Amino acid sequence: MVQRILVAEDEPIVAFDLCDTVEEAGYEVEGPFSGVSSAALASEKEKPDLAILDITLEDGEVFSLAKRLEADNVPIIFHSGAHSRDEVAEQFPAATTLIKPCPPAEMLSAVNTALERTEEEDTHLARATINV
């Protein structure tokens, strides 16, 4: 099954570059979404396997969406030029933060790492449930 990645980015060139990078790596892309509301609606319709979120979008900051995604165990990669890793880590210690501009290879490495970590956690949880 192809993994779905939600992309929320309001800078058109960055958004399409991100989508192309992710699609070329074999993932299905949901987006790009330039607003928090449209990204939230898409994530409610179908839960993504991972989300790449610019922090500041056309209609506000993505932190409320990120909290909902985090509650659904969706790994998050924040992609920002305005917020530092430390600022984001205070609210979302499990998330990855990449600073713009981010080379495609670095983004794909972060995507792969986050998805692998989630698969390992799911496998561990499944084994723990079986052993109970």
Image (cartoon, grey):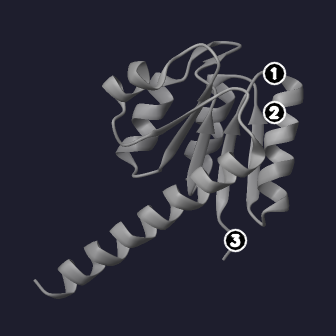
Number of the label disc, if any, that sits on residue 15: 2
Above or below 24: residue 94:
above
Number of the label disc, if any, that sits on residue 2: 3
Disc 3, SS: loop
Above or below 67: residue 125:
below
Total numbered badges shown on the rendered structure:
3
Q: CA distance from mark 3 to mark 1?
A: 26 Å
Q: Is residue 101 left or right of residue 37?
A: right
* Crowding near the residue tagged with mark 2, few <14, some 14–19, many ≥20 C-alpha atoms within 10 Å: some
> Which badge, 2 or 3, is on the more N-terminal residue?
3
Q: Are marks 1 and 2 in contact (CB under 8 Å)?
A: yes
Q: CA distance from mark 2 to mark 3?
A: 20 Å
> What is the three-letter code of the residue carrying label 1?
Glu
* Crowding near the residue tagged with mark 1, few <14, some 14–19, many ≥20 C-alpha atoms within 10 Å: some
Q: Is residue 8 left or right of residue 95?
A: right
Place of residue 4 in the rendered image (x, y in percent of width and height, measured from the top left): 66, 58
Which residue is drawn at the image coordinates 81% and 45% (left, top)? 19
Which residue is drawn at the image coordinates 78% and 63% (left, top)? 25
Q: Answer with the quarter of the image where residue 111 lies.
A: bottom right
> What is the three-letter code of the residue carrying label 2?
Ala
Q: Answer with the quarter of the image where residue 42 lies.
A: top right
Q: Nearer the viewer, residue 104 or 37?
A: 104
* Residue that carries the numbered disc 1 in the rendered image: 11
